[in-house]
Image (spheres, coloured by chain):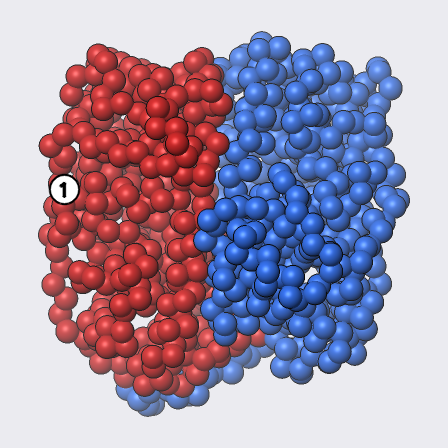
Chain colours: A red, B blue
């Protein structure tokens, strides 16, 4: 709950608003590579006396072996358990004593770690990151693995099992991806696989993926590049380069037909989940799909919100989420019924609106509203050094260059109404996974295989 | 640029000579930067509306907050009415229906949100600098010319009723409501949620909301904060153009209830159980009426809480999560408000260690009263609070929030400097005496939401106090 919360991947979050105008969005950053392959990226922002150190390791749950689901996230927890020169619980205590906060998160594609606080803590932050990047294993033992395994299981209980509708997260990945695909299991993993994780797994994973050549560190804040680089060389240069990593090629599975699953849960209101295979980040279509998601549920006047929440009043909310990961993507719609309503009614309204959207496309005014909102959300993303640092790291990972803000925004500006109509047709009318969550014993409220009049 | 940079350079020079060797000792911290409090400018419009401007042109965005003093504390108002009226504001104004209004707002790249807490009704408006003037115009429509149409009131009322129903699904939300209604008596405002409940929501209609708003929306009790890429000259021109015509209500204005809310009586420790069959975890809340921020023990209590449950390395989280593996996290907090809010310690724990977890909480409360905290804990807690404040003014939104707090407590923004100085000077003796005075394990309310059949026998054995089962 406090920290080390698992966060789901949400590629570019879009729901926000118009404005950088002609000046453009720039977050200048320098890139330097140490001889061991570690990339150090510096963004100087002298506006507040703080700094954020943001480290991405290019590994996540997608790197896990069969029978070890949840391992990358468990490993993330172990990174806080002490290293050769910073024995547990020094990491947290030293940072708190400096007035700094820290956390980490794991997705399918990457694991990030960050520290934010007063700028005089920068040497400490970098040194702590270096010690665990280079020398985590000398003090790693079974007891630490067991301790964090229990905590991760508690996290799974709290965030999934004891959460209304929480088990949808478990059910969806295997519906969307074939068994061997790196996205076919959840980031949190199964209880059985968490139980099976061993100390040897920890050592193997560390040696394979936690190497300087598989990491990028962004330092953003009231710093100077030269000083940061001197510190980085001093602390990280002695860490040896790791083995080359074989990366899976992007593969985007498609569904041959709708799949329909119904879960019973201790909930008052039924909830409908649609999920379509879509496309990976920075492909030709992901920006148009994000714009489409805004047009469907990004504002009160968006198509699905207007229809289900305002006109039909059949749902308490409806939400579309485009999720464009490194290898593949998904497009989800979630709607929760109002008291007394069953899911087929929501289903018909959603299918009806999607068909109309795909047949006629959006209006120019809808496009302009979406683009203005998306542009304003970029401004929100550059207000904090922590937010900038993480986004710079994401751009490095996805497009190889940190300051991708303007390039990213330009993609959204270039989207046309025809693009949106095309992606709606291509992705949102085809086969999908349909998951209903209904109150215990109320199967009759569940979604139907395919609503009438819906043509793929 | 300053001493920080010089220090880093010096450190770096000292280490470059051996750049390929492992550095085995943590670097020293060096001098911390100093806290700079943003400078504010003020003006009062002829209609009594106070304007506060905090300039920060780093990002071309302006963050506005219109605060109307009183909020859910406005006298004689049914629980839930202030928050309901606030949520109705953005459902249509000046002849635009909710959808048209939403479109106009989004078209500007703006967002406008309204809500109410105990202290204020707050309208937040955020927009890029170049569209902010227009966005503020829409915000004025929302405040001065809300539609409050019957159909919209009915729709939102039904959604709110549905939300009460859904709260039953969430063990954390259930525990929270049960905790407040038991810790604070029905005569106390905190007995109720600011959202009210089904009984207070069901009769809401357009006339009630309209009548409330007519009396609550008063420029003389309002403050407009503009934070970000804006000058006082711009702010005054925009505020005058859009809010200059706002007049005090003709109907008798609503005044906030006096803050001298009678402190809730504390009661002998008891345990309240709420059943959630087959729950994987139990939600635990333990607490009592706390103290107001104006308490002379504020600094000592803030530090005491940081050490006990207010940070990751605090005792409760360290024990319940890190050492024992019972939980994903545990903590505690005081609600620092102008009136005494609750002290509450909480965690979600595995069902089969519910009793053991309760024992840990009580052992820690007792330890705080019976022993002095260590020098290490004291130093760490002080630095965490004092140095952590250096990041508090990073964004326009951060600054707007800080100004809001200063208005609620009726003190200047710079009051935080003295507050942090006091925290930095707290001694272990002061922490100890604050705990003895304000953390009494014999007068706590314990709420546990979980699988009663599995957890009750163990809890009975603890003998904490009488056990009562409640429903929600």
Seen in the picture, residue A188 relative to B438 is either above or below; the reply is above
Where in the figure is residue B466, as x and y percent of width and height? 73, 56
What is the chain identity of the residue bearing mark 1? A
Residue B291 lies in quadrant: bottom right
Q: Between A423 and B236, which is closer to the camera in this rendering?
A: A423
The correct choice, above or below, for A311 with respect to A253 in the image is: above
Query: Which residue is located at x 45 percent, y 39 percent?
Result: A266
Q: Residue at x 27, y 62 (%)?
A: A193
Is residue B13 visible in the rendered structure shown here?
no
Residue at 64%, 14% in the rendered image: B148
Viewer-proximal residue among B245 and A64: A64
Does any portion of residue B114 appear in the rendered image? yes
In x, y percent, where is residue A280?
A: 20, 43
Name the residue tied to disc 1.
Answer: A252
Label 1 crowd bin: few (<14), some (14–19), many (20+), radius 10 Å: some
Q: Position of residue B362 (x, y in %)?
A: 67, 68
Element on which disc 1 rests? loop
- Across and down, in percent, residue A260 comes to 23, 31
Q: Residue at x 73, y 60 (%)?
A: B465
Q: Is residue B289 left or right of residue B135?
A: right
């Amino acid at each position: 709950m406090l920290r080390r919360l698992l966060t789901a991947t949400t590629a570019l979050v879009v729901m926000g608003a118009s404005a950088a105008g002609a000046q453009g969005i720039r977050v200048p950053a320098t890139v330097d590579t140490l001889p061991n392959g570690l990339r150090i990226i510096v963004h100087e922002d002298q506006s507040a006396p703080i700094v954020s150190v943001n480290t991405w390791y290019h590994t996540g749950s997608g790197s896990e072996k069969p029978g070890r689901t949840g391992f990358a996230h468990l490993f993330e927890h172990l990174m806080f358990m002490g290293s050769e020169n910073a024995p547990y619980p020094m990491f947290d205590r030293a940072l708190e004593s400096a007035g700094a906060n820290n956390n980490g998160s794991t997705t399918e594609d990457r694991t990030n770690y960050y520290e934010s606080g007063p700028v005089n803590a920068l040497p400490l932050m970098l040194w702590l990151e270096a010690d665990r990047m280079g020398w985590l294993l000398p003090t790693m033992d079974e007891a630490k693995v067991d301790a964090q395994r229990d905590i991760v299981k508690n996290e799974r209980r709290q965030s999934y099992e004891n959460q209304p509708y929480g088990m949808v997260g478990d059910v969806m990945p295997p519906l969307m991806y074939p068994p061997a695909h790196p996205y076919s299991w959840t980031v949190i993993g199964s209880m059985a696989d968490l139980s099976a994780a061993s100390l040897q797994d920890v050592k193997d994973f560390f040696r394979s993926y936690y190497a300087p050549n598989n990491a990028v560190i962004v330092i953003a804040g009231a710093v100077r590049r030269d000083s940061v680089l001197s510190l980085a060389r001093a602390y990280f240069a002695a860490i040896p380069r790791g083995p080359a990593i074989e990366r899976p090629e992007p593969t985007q599975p498609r569904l041959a037909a709708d799949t329909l699953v119904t879960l019973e849960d201790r909930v008052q209101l039924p909830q409908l989940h649609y999920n379509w295979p879509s496309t990976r980040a920075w492909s030709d279509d992901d920006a148009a799909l994000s714009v489409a998601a805004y047009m469907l549920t990004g504002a009160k006047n968006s198509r699905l919100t207007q229809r289900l929440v305002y006109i039909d009043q059949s749902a308490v909310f409806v939400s579309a989420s485009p999720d464009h990961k490194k290898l593949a993507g998904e497009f989800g719609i979630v709607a929760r019924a109002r008291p007394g309503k069953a899911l087929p009614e929501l289903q018909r309204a959603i299918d009806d609106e999607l068909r109309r959207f795909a047949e006629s496309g959006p209006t120019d005014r809808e496009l302009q509203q979406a683009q203005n909102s998306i542009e304003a959300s970029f401004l929100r993303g550059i207000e904090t050094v922590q937010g900038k640092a993480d986004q710079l790291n994401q751009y490095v990972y996805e497009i190889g260059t940190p300051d991708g803000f303007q390039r990213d925004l330009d993609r959204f500006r270039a989207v046309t109404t025809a693009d949106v109509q095309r992606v709606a047709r291509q992705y949102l009318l085809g086969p999908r996974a349909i998951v209903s969550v209904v109150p215990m014993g109320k199967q009759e409220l569940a979604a139907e295989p395919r609503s009438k009049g819906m043509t793929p | 640029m300053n001493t920080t940079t010089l220090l880093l350079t010096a450190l770096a020079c000292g280490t470059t000579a051996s750049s390929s060797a492992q550095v085995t000792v943590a670097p020293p911290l060096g001098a911390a930067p100093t806290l700079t409090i943003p400078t504010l400018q003020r003006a009062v419009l002829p209609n009594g509306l106070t304007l506060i401007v905090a300039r920060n042109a780093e990002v071309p965005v302006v963050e506005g907050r219109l605060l109307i003093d009183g909020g859910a504390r406005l006298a004689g108002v049914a629980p839930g009415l202030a928050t309901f009226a606030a949520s109705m504001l953005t459902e249509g104004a000046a002849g635009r229906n909710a959808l048209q209004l939403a479109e106009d707002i989004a078209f500007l790249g703006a967002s406008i949100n309204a809500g109410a807490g105990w202290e204020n009704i707050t309208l937040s408006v955020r927009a890029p600098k170049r569209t902010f003037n227009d966005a503020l115009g829409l915000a004025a429509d929302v405040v001065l010319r809300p539609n409050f149409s019957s159909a919209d009131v009915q729709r939102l009322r039904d959604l709110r009723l549905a939300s009460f129903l859904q709260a039953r699904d969430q063990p954390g939300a259930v525990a929270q409501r049960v905790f407040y209604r038991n810790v604070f008596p029905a005569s106390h405002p905190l007995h109720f949620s600011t959202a009210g409940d089904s009984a207070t929501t069901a009769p809401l209609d357009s006339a009630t909301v309209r009548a409330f708003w007519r009396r609550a929306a008063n420029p003389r009790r309002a403050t407009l904060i503009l934070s970000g890429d804006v000058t006082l000259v711009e702010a005054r021109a925009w505020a005058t153009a859009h809010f200059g015509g706002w007049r005090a209500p003709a109907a008798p204005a609503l005044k906030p209830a006096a803050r001298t809310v009678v402190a809730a009586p504390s009661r002998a420790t008891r345990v309240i159980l709420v059943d959630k069959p087959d729950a994987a975890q139990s939600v635990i809340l333990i607490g009592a009426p706390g103290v107001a921020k104006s308490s002379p023990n504020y600094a000592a209590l803030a530090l005491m809480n940081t050490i006990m449950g207010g940070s990751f390395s605090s005792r409760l989280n360290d024990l319940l999560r890190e050492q024992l593996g019972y939980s994903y996290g545990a903590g505690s907090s005081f609600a620092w408000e102008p009136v005494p809010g609750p002290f509450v310690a909480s965690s979600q724990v595995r069902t089969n260690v519910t009793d053991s977890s309760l024992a840990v909480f009580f052992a820690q409360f007792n330890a705080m009263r019976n022993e002095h905290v260590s020098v290490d804990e004291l130093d760490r807690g002080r630095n965490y609070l004092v140095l952590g404040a250096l990041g508090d003014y990073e964004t326009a939104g951060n600054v707007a929030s800080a100004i809001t707090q200063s208005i609620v407590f009726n003190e200047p923004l710079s009051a935080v400097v003295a507050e942090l100085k006091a925290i930095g000077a707290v001694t272990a003796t002061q922490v100890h005496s604050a705990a003895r005075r304000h953390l009494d394990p014999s007068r706590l309310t314990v709420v546990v939401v979980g699988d009663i059949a599995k957890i009750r026998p163990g809890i009975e054995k603890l003998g904490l106090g009488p056990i009562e089962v409640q429903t929600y």
